[in-house]
Amino acid sequence: MDASAQIATIADNFIDGEWVSEPDKMPAINPATGETIAMLPNSSGETVQAAVRSAKRAARIWAAIPVFERSAMCVAIASKIDERQEKIARVLSMEQGKVLGEAMGEVAKAADGFRLAAELVKQMAGQTLPAEDSTKLVMTLRQPRGVYGVITPWNFPVNIPVEYLAPGIATGNAIVWVPAPTTSLVACELMDAINAGGLPKGVLNLVIGEGAIAGDAVVIHPDVAAIGFTGSAVTGKRIAERGAGKPMLLELGGNGPVIVFEDADLDKAAAAAAGGAFFNAGQVCAATGRVLAHHSIAATLADKLAEHARAHVLGDPFHQGTTMGPLNNPKVAAKVLEHVEDAISKGAKLLAGGKPRPDLGSELYFEPTVLSGVTRDMRINREETFGPIVPVLAFADQAEALDLALDSEYGLSVGVFTADVSRGMEMAKAIPAGIVNINAGSTYWEIHLPFGGGSNTKSGIGRLGGMLTLEAMTEIKMITVTLEGKAGAA
Ligand code: NAD
């Protein structure tokens, strides 16, 4: 059965509490078949203007709603997402390409994200501060920033938006959200569930279109106070320039090494590194971008990784038994092939996979792949591949492992496997990444924990996760009250 054909979807913008169609259209493509499944809005700058006007009106009203009511709204939204879990997950699989089981998990986590924001916003505290002037009572309040622009990618097109939408709504911001064009149908489903929770009009507006047009119009709009962006380093840099002066959360790319020392449990290291490379067909910012292995165990580890690769079942994301679906779009598929070809032409050895599989239904299927004998100069080591590929590089000693880890423009997440936790801690402290997991892969993270890129790397600015996102989406206002006598000083 072609399960995807059964799914009816909305394909419009959502502005000021209404579904609104756009005259200019672009196709939504099913990556598993190459078929056009809907026509989406290709929104203009004027549509963004309308969305920002709506958000600006709503921002004042929503900010004044008591925190406990905004919290209750997030709980109601979470219930609507739970009720529609399967429908949203089916659209997610159909449009993104991930297997249905992974899609179900992603939607469940999105509901959790709203519940977490609902809890945390009730705990968000200001301060009272001592002052030299004893007549002053000094306090700080956390206030919403106003209209928040949110621009999101296609790899986790439900979870990543929720990382901003839930804390943004909970803290009293109004939002204009531009999702990635190749996963905008599922954005409509998520928008519909959020709206069903009872959100007042204008608090969340969805504008579908090309990033360079609709996204850019949000970034440069003078009434958009702040930006939350997850996507590539190249686009992040452009947004930082175009929106200069606005507070920004930028969550960008990675090329996370998983470093495996000779004393590590190789079965556990291989399972974690393979999991981090093949989950979501490798389209994960914190993926196992490369494996750095001590030379004495590199061949054994590479063989174990190849076994994991061969155990995958590549195919239609809706078919029972499929463990990996197609890549999401032609751009990422072309890069994956280029990186594999570049590595092989420079001497890497192919242990598993290595080819596109158009016979499976579209040009976007790519075999889970393991390469050994990878060296520094290869693109697969230097750049983010964003596909189901594990390159294995060998190192002589800890100093060389550290040098290979540091020789990267990225600094998002790292895994270190060793029986010597002190050595793991030395590595963790020395690598300028946002996350280092000792005896776990680079992908381990939970939504209440800090996530983001290391300073002076291409992996981003700021931290998402739990209270950190709520803090980033609000600003501190200091208020002083002058009192009679000495009643004020804390
Ligand atoms: P991308 O940068 O091409 O696109 C991301 C979003 O930006 C899309 O919605 C796109 O339409 C929009 N966009 C494109 N040009 C724009 C412009 N000029 N102005 C405003 N918006 C614009 O990235 P992608 O290919 O969609 O996503 C993959 C990238 O995202 C990878 O590099 C991955 O590592 C990164 N990512 C990072 C994290 C993280 O948390 N650090 C999480 C997931 C993905």
Image: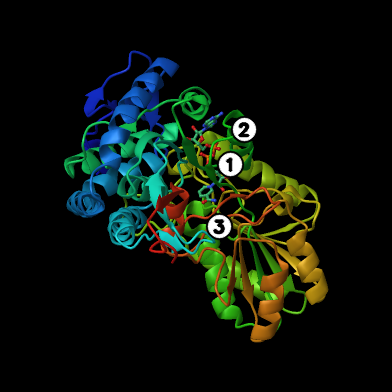
Query: Helix, strand or loop at disc 1?
Result: loop
Q: Is mark 3 within 8 Å of ligand 1?
A: yes
Label drawn at residue 286: 3
Q: Amino acid at mark 3?
A: Ala
Q: Residues within 10 Å of mark 3 (few under 14, many from 20)?
A: many
Image: 344 above or below 486 = above
Q: Is mark 1 within 8 Å of ligand 1?
A: yes
Give the x, y percent position of residue 469.
Answer: 44, 53
The numbered mark, 2 or 3, whose residue comes first in the sequence reads: 2
* Observer-nearest of 206 and 232: 206
Query: Helix, strand or loop at disc 3?
Result: loop
Image: 154 above or below 376 = above
* Observer-nearest of 139 and 412: 139
Q: Residues within 10 Å of mark 2 (few under 14, many from 20)?
A: some
Query: Helix, strand or loop at disc 2?
Result: helix
Q: Quadrant of the N terminus?
A: top left
Q: Is mark 2 within 8 Å of ligand 1?
A: yes
Give the x, y percent position of residue 360.
Answer: 44, 44
Q: Residues within 10 Å of mark 1 (few under 14, many from 20)?
A: some
- Evaluate if marks 2 and 1 touch, with contact meaning CB atoms under 8 Å apart: no
Give the x, y percent position of residue 71.
Answer: 24, 54
* Observer-nearest of 190 and 297: 190
The numbered mark, 1 or 3, whose residue comes first in the sequence reads: 1
Q: CA distance from mark 1 to mark 3?
A: 12 Å
Q: Which residue is mark 2?
A: 238
Label drawn at residue 232: 1
Left/right of residue 22 with respect to residue 453 in the rendered view = left
The residue most toward the front is 485
Q: CA distance from mark 2 to mark 1?
A: 10 Å
